């Protein structure tokens, strides 16, 4: 188990945005609490994206969809 590098909340599950099944090292994930974008390490903990990874995911429609869904969910709670 790992904690979000943005908000510190425990991350105890993952759904695939760029993978199917279990996450693998290098897969990208988004914290559903704060929206922080991270990657999995070799031991499946979370790490910050490298500069190259940040460029690669910038504007990725899948990540944009996740962030939009987070925003809508937050608006519905209010």
Image: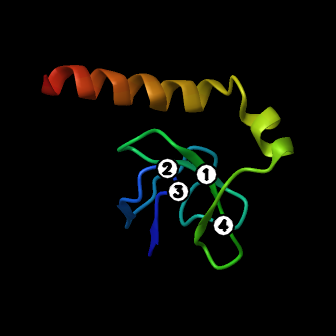
Please identify the quadrant where the C terminus is shown: top left
Give the secondary structure at mark 4: loop
Q: Residue at x 44, y 75 (%)?
A: 1
Q: Residue at x 57, y 55 (%)?
A: 20
Q: Residue 70: percent from the left, percent from the top?
A: 36, 30
Q: Which residue is mark 2?
A: 6
Q: Which residue is mark 3?
A: 5
Q: Gap in Å between the C-alphas at discs 3 and 1?
A: 8 Å
Q: Which residue, as the protein is rendered here, is positioned at the far left?
A: 78
Circle 1 or circle 4, nearest the eye: 1
Horizontally, residue 66 falls left or right of residue 54, namely left
Label 1, residues with CA under 10 Å away: few <14, some 14-19, many ≥20:
many
Among the 4 quarters of the image, the one containing residue 53: top right
Mark 1 in CB contact with mark 2 (< 8 angstroms): yes
Q: Which residue is mark 1?
A: 38
Circle 4 or circle 3, nearest the eye: 3
Mark 3 in CB contact with mark 1 (< 8 angstroms): yes
Q: Gap in Å between the C-alphas at discs 4 and 3?
A: 18 Å
Label 3, residues with CA under 10 Å away: few <14, some 14-19, many ≥20:
some
Mark 3 in CB contact with mark 2 (< 8 angstroms): yes
Give the secondary structure at mark 1: strand
């Amino acid at each position: 188990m790992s904690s979000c590098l943005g908000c510190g909340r425990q991350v105890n599950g993952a759904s695939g945005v760029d993978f199917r099944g279990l996450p693998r090292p290098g897969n990208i994930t988004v914290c559903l609490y704060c929206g922080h974008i991270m990657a999995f390490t070799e031991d499946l903990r979370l790490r910050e994206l490298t500069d190259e990874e940040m460029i690669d995911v910038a504007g990725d429609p899948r990540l944009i969809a996740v962030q939009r869904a987070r925003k809508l969910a937050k608006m519905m709670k209010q």
